[in-house]
Image (spheres, grey):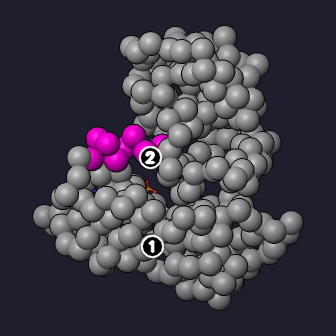
Amino acid sequence: MIQAENVSYKRVNKDVLKNISWQVKEGEHWCLVGLNGAGKSTLLNMVNGYIWPTEGSMTVLNQTFGQVDLRNLRQSIGWVSSSLQQQLHDNEIVENIVLSGKFATIGLYDDIEDRDREKAYELMDELHCHHLAKRSYDTLSQGEKQRVIIARALMANPKLLILDEPCTGLDILARETLLSIIEELAEKQDAPTLIYVTHHVEEILPCFTHTLLLKNGTVFDSGRTEELMNAESLSAFYERPVHLDKQDERLYLRLAQSTKNSL
Ligand SMILES: Nc1ncnc2c1ncn2[C@@H]1O[C@H](COP(=O)(O)OP(=O)(O)OP(=O)(O)O)[C@@H](O)[C@H]1O
């Protein structure tokens, strides 16, 4: 699905990404974890073909950058992010926002068929937002908005679905609701490959089979989540001693007391 080989992205005064090698295979779901400024957004912009590596090679959905029309590639990638949320027309009704995902347009400019509407309602069911279909988007809570834009992204049957910090701004209940919907989505047989981006280890769901730890523009570690995520490696990642608790297949991270005192 994604193959990055020794990818770097150099700007005048900065190596934003350095020597990234990362492989995402069909059937895997990945979590991309990094602190602020780690290079997550830059890497996603590259996966979506908005920027190209200055060194190395990037292949997404079997298309190698430099050899393909990226507009076609983007139709197979759903990217749910806060910047997409800001671009949507606030006074549009939810049903139309979901339907517009079929064409990956901000408004509805193409003909809608009955089967498109059926599909939009199926997706709204899946994302638990059917009851919001006739509501204006600007009247929704943040958690409801996130569910709507995920339904919208699924209208185009993406092969890759990128969820870029979807829990930002959600309270604990809205966060857990959204996470359990994402878990259900991942378990579906025809689910797209998920790339879930977050700052928070707590959001790594059991369905995320693999994790990429990104630090200062480099891959700190990557591989199977259960092998990667332990207190020792995360203490090295955060450069502070941390405790890691596991409950119901989820990880909970705490800074060690001695560290907190020195912050
Ligand atoms: N075009 C650019 N020129 C110079 N520096 C850049 C450029 N793009 C990004 N950077 C820098 O590279 C670093 C990584 O940025 P990026 O936005 O990818 O991080 P991030 O992991 O998404 O951070 P956050 O979690 O805070 O959104 C930052 O220090 C940023 O200022």
- In the rendered image, the residue lying farthest to the right is 248
Q: Quadrant of ligand 1?
A: bottom left
In this image, 250 relative to 92: left or right?
right
Quarter of the image where one finds residue 137: top right
Q: Amino acid at mark 1?
A: Gln
Q: Return the x and y of residue 38 as percentages of the image width and height.
A: 41, 66
Question: Is 10 rendered above or below residue 90?
Answer: below
Where is residue 219, by image quadrant? bottom left
Where does the image place residue 211, in percent across and percent down from the top left?
Answer: 57, 71
| Circle on res. 23 | 1
Task: Tell me the residue that label 2 is attached to.
Answer: 77
Q: Residue at 18% of width from left, 58% of height from top? A: 66
Q: Quadrant of residue 126?
A: top right
Q: Are marks 1 and 2 in contact (CB under 8 Å)?
A: no
Q: Which residues are magenta?
A: 70-78
Q: Of helix, strand and loop, which one carries label 2?
A: strand
